[in-house]
Image: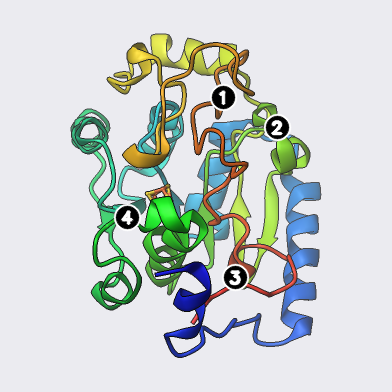
Amino acid sequence: MTQAAESLSRPPLVVRPPANQDDGLRLSERARLLEQRYKGLNSIQLLDTAINEIFAGRIAVVSSFGTESAVLLDLVAQVNRHTPVIFLETGKHFPETLAYRDTLIDKLGLTDVRSVGPAADDLNWADQDGTLWRRNPDLCCQLRKVLPLERALSGFSAWINGRKRFQGGQRQSLGLFEAAGSRIKVNPLVTWGTKDLARAFVERDLPRHPLGAQGYPSVGCAPCTSKVTGDEDGAADGSRAGRWAGSGKTECGIHKAPWASQAPAKGLLR
Ligand code: SF4
């Protein structure tokens, strides 16, 4: 099915913007005030404050269980190992990633890891043969990541993620708090660099993702992740190289969806 046909052959997907414009503005102001108040905290202090005070019972972590994920999950577990952790089980992960998820659950004592998958209806509509990633990777990410995450975050007021400024692109200007649709995003690792991450793995005796040592600095879905030879963007700092290599795509969309950012709403959300 062509991209155009996919867009036309299903009832149109309708963007759901924030309930009203004022809500978005109020959330932006709240993020700004949170940033102002808590900008002096280190990562674990920030997590403690966010998880146990500001958003107690209303916050989740979103993790890919990728090559750097253990650091954030370890910090979260030190603060409260019962914090909900959302893992987008796209059905396209390397088996090593699924095994690593289970290893980290055991190692860190995480009690509430939620593996959420795409809706069967969505896959029946657009990806019956499982090759949508090749024909239309943006739609594939939409169905396998963006929409499942929106559903999984229902009932939460905030979510924690592990983006860092050194990863470049739009991440270079990240603050600790962001307004994200109807929620606040918390970014406790924004100032961390590769040396900080490496030190945390050693000091905290954290297991490594098995594919890291095999030439994958960043690990996502298997069809869209490749080994890095040293001449790709990002290879120098080992950040996001090898993801959607050669396609121009750099993000899966969960941080750009209308409900997850303040970007103008023009996506495909139902
Ligand atoms: S990363 Fe690739 S396989 Fe995974 S959801 Fe996106 S396009 Fe599909």
Under mark 3, the amino acid is Trp
- Element type at mark 3: helix
Q: In the image, what residue occupies the spot 37% across and 18% down?
A: 212
The x, y position of residue 11, in whole percent, is 45, 90
Residue 42 x %, y %: 63, 30
Give the Cα distance between marks 2 and 1: 9 Å
Disc 4 crowd, CA 10 A, few/some/many (<14, 14-19, 20+): few
Residue occupied by mark 1: 239
Q: Residue at x 24, y 61 (%)?
A: 129
Q: What residue is disc 3 on?
A: 259
- Return the disc, 2 or 4, that comes first in the chain's sequence: 4
As measured in the structure, the alpha-carbon distance from the residue carrying label 1 to the one carrying label 3 is 26 Å
Depth check: 56 or 153 in front?
A: 153
Residue of label 4? 131
Color theme of the render = rainbow
Which residue is disc 2 drawn over? Answer: 168
